[in-house]
Amino acid sequence: MSDNALKLLRAIEWLPASSPLLTAPLLDWLMEEDSMTKRFERHCQKVTVEPLQEGFISAEEVGAEAALLPFEQRYWLREILLFGDGVPWLAGRTIVPESTLIGPEAMLQDLGTRPLGRYLFASSTLTRDFIEPGTIESLWGRRSRLRLSGKPLLLTELFLPAAPLYLSVTAEGTH
């Protein structure tokens, strides 16, 4: 499950927000400006995170996503599964340029099982440059470039089949 989810996450096809594939209920989820962790918490008793991979990778390993970040020799990579009440709802991938990790942002390397959103949205210095929706194999995702104290990081999220996003979209389609 986790290997397949990460393969799909890395292969998302990015769409303009004006794409006719993006219905209002989808956009409501995909363009969420607040913490996705907080939004998920409204749909379950407990949100948990399972880190799958954490560590430094080279610019070559970052691939095409490097174009969305300043060029550096090394980037911090964190790949996780996020669960709602023990059910996998989201695969996440965070890429952080090494220079972003200077100062309080060094905490990004020590999140462990803590959801990224709990850390990011607790910061008064958080800004978001963009949200880009995408799709792969009937699943939906998004990526955002966020900044902490002006320093960038890239977050990519793939909503897995059991995610509440799909319940909202299905409910809308039955009206």
Image: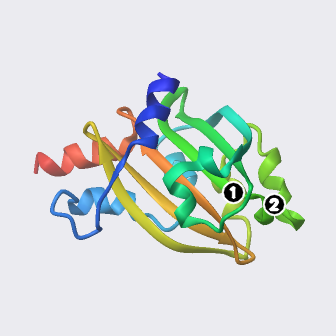
* The quadrant where residue 31 appears: bottom left
**Image point (54%, 33%), residue name:** 83
Query: In the image, residue 65 lies at what x, y percent?
Result: 52, 56
Work out which residue is located at the far top of the displayed protein and give it.
1
Work out which residue is located at the far left of the displayed protein and give it.
175
Labelled disc at residue 101: 2
Query: In the image, residue 63 lies at what x, y percent?
Result: 54, 49
Q: Of residues 46 and 18, which is closer to you in this image?
A: 18
Type of amino acid under label 1: Val
Q: Of residues 60 and 145, which is closer to you in this image?
A: 60
Query: In the image, residue 66 lies at what x, y percent?
Result: 57, 58
Labelled disc at residue 9: none
CB within 8 Å, label 1 to label 2: yes
Secondary structure, mark 2, is helix
Query: According to the image, what is the colour scheme of the structure?
Result: rainbow
Asked whether, in this view, residue 108 is left or right of residue 168, the answer is right
Question: Is residue 82 among the parts visible in the rendering?
Answer: yes
Q: Which residue is mark 1?
A: 96
**Image point (52%, 25%), residue name:** 2
* Mark 1 and mark 2: Cα distance apart in space: 7 Å
